[in-house]
Amino acid sequence: MAQTLRNDQIEAKQRAGSTLLEVRNLTKVYADVRAVDNVSLEVRQGELVSFLGPSGSGKTTTLNMIAGFDEPSAGDILIGGRAIRGVSPHKRDIGMVFQRYTLFPHLTVFENVAFPLTVRGVGKAEIAERVRAALKLIRLETYGDRRPSQLSGGQQQRVALARAVIYEPQLLLMDEPLGALDKKLREEIQIEIRRIHERLGVTIVYVTHDQEEALRLSDRIAVFNHGRIVQVGTGTALYERPADAFVASFVGSSNFLDGTLTAADGAHCKVALAGGGTVTAPAQPGLAAGSAVSLMFRPDRAVLRAVGRAEPDENRIVGRVLESVYLGESISHTLVLSDGTEISIKQPSGGGGFAADFTGEAEVCWRRDQTHLFAAGAR
């Protein structure tokens, strides 16, 4: 229910907001390396869009070109309909937050947050009022007299965030801002970023290689691979309807099995698995009978059943449980199939499924409509 409401809010925002940032056929070439390859994207006013991908996929280079730190080899960047190629970074009305906090060590928290207003010639009374409001927003209103060295890493990053938004830039760029923090702190600051984004309505482009972070924060996610955007969509769309095998493997956990498409009948097709057995999947355009395919299903969409207990609308494969790990809210089972392939299943704990100490043979069962097919070798 909460996820449905969140998706409804995202769709309403996309319908209502006009395009603030537009990237057209953006390309960056270093010697013989094509770091960014013909990237195009629109970001609407008030959206939080994440660039998600592995190291070297082009996401930070794209962000740096938007910020003005790198000059594109080709393509255009527009903010509010105005082309900004060749415009100096400080004239683009863009705020930046980096992984390194980049706070001035000799200035207090108050002075650090005030710095963007000071250099813009804002009056002292207005600066004091706006800094107090910014510190209250990040819940550090009593920390104004402290130096950065007296703050934790999470507090320093919140100060950096306040400094980036205090002069109300039309666009905020964030490059792996939480990469140096531990998991608990990252989750706390993610909540702060989400709250500040919703409170201020600032448009944010956020770079991360952490899929969970992107899913937690984003209205939409642009998935990068080899310098290109391979899919853009909500977290739900990327997880439930991945455009290719790379997205399926990078966004969320996944199990892949090799096979051959043997027959297609309207909306469904049959796949003979390399390790033995046949499963049913939704038909995919461009995949004809005889095609070598890679079949994917999610660990959290499968269940373990006693052999022979699969439901009529389920696919089934038999495996032997190698290991079961209790993770608190869930149990992760690792199974090996007859051809040596290992797969994983994630089941809620306490739900009446197989116990964490179970070993032996079982059926892995999942709904046929939860089966995804891709051309072989596409990962």
Image (cartoon, grey):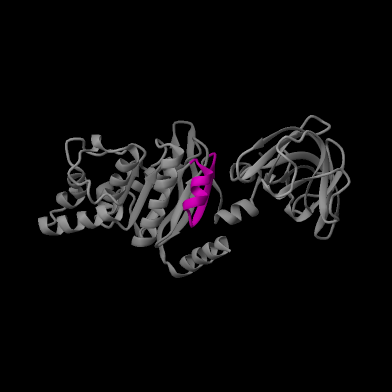
Q: Does the magenta stretch include residue 287?
A: no
Drawn side of residue 126 relative to residue 374, left or right = left
Give the residue displayed 35% in from the left and 61% down from the top.
Answer: 199
Q: In which quarter of the image is residue 4?
A: bottom right
- If the image is split into quadrants, where does the C terminus sit? top right
Closer-to-camera residue (233/107)? 107
Give the camera-side residue of 69 and 122: 122
Q: In which quarter of the image is the N terminus?
A: bottom right
- Image height check: is 314 above or below 5? above
Q: Which residue is drawn at 86% across and 45% down?
A: 278
Question: Residue 328's spot in the image, x, y percent?
Answer: 60, 42
Q: In the shown orientation, is residue 135 left or right of residue 365?
A: left
For the record, the magenta segment spans: 209-226
Residue at the image position 33 percent from the left and 61 percent from the top: 200
On the question of residue 68 being in view, the answer is: no
Residue 120 image position (x, y, % from top left): 16, 53
The image quadrant of residue 178 is top left
Q: Is residue 196 visible?
A: yes
Magenta span includes 212: yes
Q: Where is residue 48 in the image (x, y as percent from the top left)?
A: 43, 55
- Position of residue 300 relative to residue 341, above or below, is below
Q: In this view, does 362 lie to the left or right of 212?
A: right
Q: In this view, does 356 lie to the left or right of 61?
A: right
